[in-house]
Image (cartoon, helix red, strand yellow):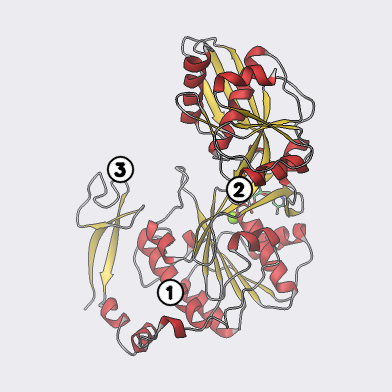
Amino acid sequence: MAKARTRYLCSDCGTSSAQWVGKCPGCKAWNSLKEETITDSGKRAHRYSAASPQGGVLTQKARPLAEVTIENIVRLPSGEAELDRVLGGGVVPGSLILLGGEPGIGKSTLMLQMAMMVSTTGAKVLYVSGEESPEQVRMRALRIGTVPKSLMVLPETRVPMVLNALQEDEFSLLVIDSVQTLDQPEVDGAPGSVSQIRESVAAITSHAKSFALPVFLVGHITKEGSLAGPKVLEHMVDVVLQFEGDRNHAYRMLRAAKNRFGTTSELGIYEMMGDGLKAVENPSEVLLGEAGEASSGSAIAVALEGARPLLVEMQALVSTAVYGTPQRSGTGFDLRRLNMLLAVLEKRCGFKLGAFDVFLNLAGGLKISDPANDLAVVAAILSSSLDLPLDRDTCFAGEVGLSGEIRPVARLDERMSEAARLGMKRMLVSGHGKRPPTPKGLTLVPIKRVSEIQRVIF
Ligand code: TYD
Ligand code: MG
């Protein structure tokens, strides 16, 4: 007979505990344990019995890896070039792809857009909407474009109903928006709880794998910025995509945090328009185009985001602190890194910024964590505090070390070609290490120490 008991599950890592504790014994997170009632119906034993569909796994025989054929893996193009690129060249049949992002960033828009692209080819796509009514989805679809006949929408949160719909028709793609609304009635707990998410996704996974159906799952993000729900969810899926950006800006970045079928270094850039998301093919041009006239406090960094070189504008504002403690704030840039750079400037260049507020901004609302941005940040801060503008055709790529040395950066050749392509004339780089041949039109200015910057740029 089924017996019910109470367990406490960590909402971060899924660790279970018989009693509530403040700190998760598994991942050491504080206050992450949530009470859940579970009915033990002996399901686990049943799951591996030969009669169950998963039991079929046991009938697989070990065979030489060299004899495993992969010819029949054909990737399905999603019709979204940026998405395909981030996935590693299309969607792999039977794969589970989790798309995470903050509310309002455009996850549903991206998914619907992709579903519409795939279904224009005549392929049947099922869009399961647990958050919005079919009318709302239809309204969004109308903004994006014409709605193909083979795109089906199902307002449903109950997993068995979703599986029924999948049995009734042959679909080429399934989108679930969102995984937090899924409800598996066999399992106790409210939708969005650890065990609900885990069991719902497990049920969908087993269907997807046996029918080679690719599945996109939309996932919410907690206020700390991690995917809501148990970490196990990230282990269960094949690909974890992150959709990020600043809601007040139009640009969005799509990247893979995990990818079983490709690299995680690809980056897709989108712009949110009135009629959906548009791929940004030349991000550097767009980002620099926003910059306008030369003004003090602005420097151009040649960053590398994933596999992609990007020219971005760093904006700094240095002003006298009004209150006792000066403020430091960084948008799109790590605050600790900013503090470290300010300390280096003070110690190695004699720039006393202790009594000044320092604000740093990455133009376009992007978030890029490439140490090569250091040099541009330092240049922008110097430019603002001296109130001297920098040339618009000078760019920077170098990491600043604690002793004030400028360190070489990875893949300088690709950065140089991107800089040259966008008409940059001078590029400040590290004077240490080897430098590849310079493309035409661009002059490299190697510097070894942060104290040399001022002499070179003004
Ligand atoms: P949405 O996809 O609902 O975000 P999420 O599913 O991640 O919560 O879209 C978010 C915002 O995008 C919404 O506030 C309106 C805006 N938007 C546009 O600017 N243009 C459009 O064509 C669409 C469909 C939405
Ligand atoms: Mg949504």
Q: Can residue 286 be seen in this view?
A: no
Give the residue at mark 3: 30
Residue 121 lies in what quarter of the image? Answer: bottom right
**Identity, as a three-letter code, of the amino acid under mark 3:** Trp
Quarter holding the C terminus is: top right
Measure how far apart labels 3 and 1 are at the Cα level. 30 Å
Q: Image quadrant of ligand 2? A: bottom right
Q: Is residue 100 above or below residue 84?
A: above
Q: In this view, does 362 lie above or below 247?
A: above
Earlier residue among tags 1 and 2:
2
Label 1 packing within 10 angstroms: few (<14), some (14-19), many (20+): some
Quarter holding the N terminus is: bottom left
Residue 203's disc is 1
Measure how far apart labels 3 and 2 are at the Cα level. 28 Å
Left or right? Give the position of 64 relative to 443.
left
In what element is the residue under mark 2?
loop
